[in-house]
Image (cartoon, rainbow, N blue to C red):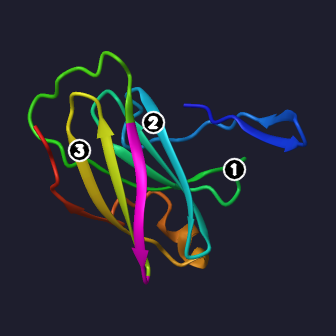
Amino acid sequence: MALRHGKFAGTTGTLVNSPAIPDPAGATADRLLAYTVFDGMSLLAVQSIGDSHVSIYDATDPSAPVYLGAGNNTTGVLTANANASGQLAWGAGSGDTIKLYAMSTNQGIQAFTIQVPEPASVAMLAGLAGIFSLRRRRAD
């Protein structure tokens, strides 16, 4: 998947670059995005409409997002998301954890509690999927 990184000056937008976003969890139609700044770190969540997995990136440098981990609370065979629609929403945060809610149409609602690493340790965590503390919150 490619991210469009742009800048705005007044009403004029300029494309800076289009970095590829790595998805070691499997890029199966990554479409849904949500961005937040929490505890000094820029976080980007990306959800697949194919298998509903959610990947988290450190987007401090939008030209080079760093993969932090992925999670998926769904089970069984998923109904196709033929409309390619859904929603990601960052929730409340406290200490070093923040909530993330994910809904891919026809595939249920997921809730995650994400422990945000110290900015200095992000390089060590790149590629690790262990930052998720998963809780099942699925509506059928």
Disc 3: which residue: 109
Disc 2: which residue: 32
The quarter of the picture where residue 41 lies is bottom right
Chain part drawn in magenta: 87-95
- Give me the residue at 54% from left, 31% from top: 1
Report the amino acid beneath label 3. Answer: Ile
Q: Position of residue 64 (x, y in %)?
A: 68, 49
Question: What is the distance, in whole Å, between disc 3 and disc 1 at their CAs?
Answer: 27 Å
Q: Position of residue 11 (x, y in %)?
A: 88, 36
Mark on residue 43?
none
Q: Main secondary structure of the magenta part?
A: strand
Q: Earlier in the sequence, mark 2 or mark 1?
A: 2
- Give me the residue at 23% from left, 61% from top: 134
Residue 93 on the magenta segment = yes
Secondary structure beneath dot 1 equals: loop
Q: Give the left or right position of residue 13, taking residue 40 as reference.
A: right
> Of 8 and 28, which appears nearest the observer?
8
Secondary structure beneath dot 3 equals: strand
Secondary structure beneath dot 2 equals: strand
Residue 52 on the magenta segment = no
* Relative vertical location of residue 28 with respect to residue 89 in this rendering, above or below: above
Of marks 2 and 1, the one in the foreground: 2
Q: Position of residue 111 (x, y in %)?
A: 26, 56
Question: What is the distance, in whole Å, between disc 3 and disc 2 at their CAs?
Answer: 13 Å
Q: Earlier in the sequence, mark 3 or mark 1?
A: 1
Q: Position of residue 78 (x, y in %)?
A: 16, 28
Disc 1: which residue: 62
Report the amino acid beneath label 1. Answer: Pro
- Give me the residue at 34% from left, 29% from top: 49
Question: What is the distance, in whole Å, between disc 2 and disc 1 at their CAs?
Answer: 17 Å
> Of 103 and 47, which appears nearest the observer?
103
Report the amino acid beneath label 2. Answer: Leu
